[in-house]
Image (cartoon, grey):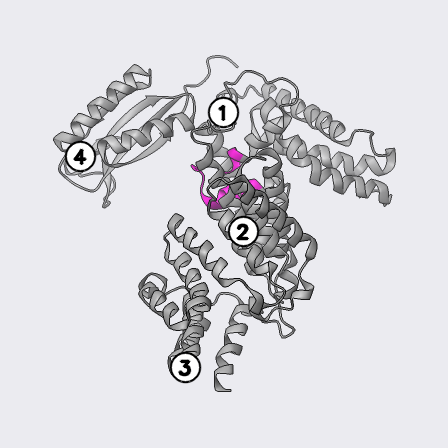
Amino acid sequence: MQYLVSVIDDRTNSGTPEEMVAIDAFNEKLRAGGHWVFAAGLAAPSTATVIDGRGEQPIFTDGPFIESKEHMAGLWIIEAPDLDIALELMAEGSKACNRRLEVRPVLPPPASEA
Amino acid sequence: MSGSDPDAQAALACAYSEEWARVVASLARRFGDLDVAEDAAAEAFAIAVERWPADGVPPNPGGWLTTTANHKAVDRIRREQRRADKHREALMLHDDDPPEPLGAIDDDRLRLVFTCCHPALSMEARVALTLRLVGGLTVAEIARAFLVQETTMGQRITRAKGKIAAARIPYRVPASADLPRRVTGVLAVLYLVFNEGYLATSADTDPLRADLTAEAIRLTRLVRELLPDDGEVAGLLALMLLTEARRPARIAADGSLAPLAEQDRTVWVASLITEGHRLVRERLDAAAAPGRYQLLAAINAVHTDAPTADDTDWSQVLALYDQLVRLDPSPIVALNRAVAVAEVEGADAALEIIEPLGSALDAYHAFHATRAELLRRVGRRADARQAFDRAIALAGNTAEAATLSRRRDQLEA
């Protein structure tokens, strides 16, 4: 079972050097436990572009799709057998990156047979 | 409903309160799906309502219900498999533990309790799920008790079950490192149910709301049966019993709430007090550092031990509050402690403690009511009147407002 973990941030500067060290150590732990799938930091929301390709011509709009005080500053995708394990792991992740996190289940791929 | 055979009706009522949680819990474990478990249990009980009065009560009602519910669940799953619901398996409740030997059925109920009270669910959802799946209340009953539309309550429960399945909230008893924190979470749900019933009590309250206290006590007894060594579970049960024991004295003839000091202690329920005191003594003997509920229970034990309000051992109450403040330094605990300080050291000392709490508790009617009472005692009548006015404006319950008005009007005398 995979979970998307969003890093919730209300600041524009990225992590401090201390936070980066703690995050690296945490990622190492995720890898060692077989939980690591993917992780990345994101550039500021002001660098985002919204695309609407549903019409004949795609429309590009400057800025994030939603304006809010808080934004997603990074993400993890982790592998965990259940939510309790995901929550326990990411409580530690929250401490490492010094930010609140949102954990959300990734839908399983459709079963290949009935 | 067919027939009115009193034996069958009694057996049905008894089976419902004894067996509902057991049936739901064992089905949830076997089929890995709370929705299937709930529906199949409800169907089995509906069949019992039809058959038992006509065919007689089966020799083992619990076994009969479990078997019948199992058949219903298997039928439903077969039906759904024929519809080739490809996502079904992926959405099943997750359980990696090996199958447990016989006798693990009580563990199933404990699993059910922990799943319903999972910290990833909202408090509202935890309360609703616990009352539905563990308590066996109908959605309509829960909706009425919490003053929301039945459809709203139904959606709340459906959404919670959906999250449990989709996010894979596990169906298991937490690991021992996590257990105390998770038990605290379960107790918070039960205490909220109890208080919802207790505080709502007034002349014009829907009786179903008042029934919540009985339901909370029943569920806490169940959790105590499942976790007999947990001091806080015993503490919460004792606290509920000692509070419930005073209920008959709580509403005065004019419909207002009678404060502890003015209650007719002869109508307190002696059996509940005896049981509560026994639990408190048991915890004192255990010599483990008491938690919050054990301390609150002990405070209530001191109150219910006094034949009259004047006999209350206030220094004992204050000593217990001193312990409680160290565990829980919240302004509400400090406010309650101040009431004991007023009795031991005088109203002036108590006022000194509560004045600084004003910024945190300004919207809390009990703060203004307590302050008003203390101001009255030190002779500051005009200030007391103002504080009573503020308390009355903030009181959410008609009986409570009536009491405060009465006390304000007594200022004239």
* Badge 3: chain ID: B
Q: Which residue is mark 1?
A: B91
Q: Secondary structure at mark 1?
A: helix
Q: Which residue is mark 3?
A: B379
Q: Which residue is mark 2?
A: B297
Q: Marks 2 and 3: in contact by CB < 8 Å?
A: no
Q: CA distance from mark 3 to mark 1?
A: 66 Å
Can residue B229 be seen in this snapshot? yes
Q: Nearer the viewer, mark 3 or mark 4?
A: 3
Residue at figure coordinates x 43%, y 76% from the top left: B389
Q: Nearer the viewer, mark 4 or mark 1?
A: 1
* Badge 4: chain ID: A
Q: Are marks 3 and 1 on the same chain?
A: yes
Residue at figure coordinates x 35%, y 32% from the top left: A103
Q: Earlier in the sequence, mark 1 or mark 2?
A: 1
Q: Where in the figure is residue B285, as x and y percent of width and height?
A: 56, 42
Q: Secondary structure at mark 4?
A: loop
Question: Which of the two residues, B128 or B236, is positioned nearer the viewer here?
Answer: B236
Q: Where in the figure is residue B232, as x and y percent of width and height?
A: 51, 42
Q: Secondary structure at mark 2?
A: helix
Can residue B140 be seen in this snapshot? no
Residue at figure coordinates x 42%, y 73% from the top left: B374
Q: Examine the structure image and report whether residue B75 is included in the region drawn in magenta.
A: no
Q: Residue furthest top?
A: A113
Q: CA distance from mark 1 to mark 2?
A: 42 Å
Residue at figure coordinates x 44%, y 42% from the top left: B122
Q: Which residues are magenta?
A: B114-130
Q: Examine the structure image and report whether residue B121 is included in the region drawn in magenta.
A: yes
Q: Earlier in the sequence, mark 3 or mark 1?
A: 1
Q: Which residue is mark 4?
A: A48
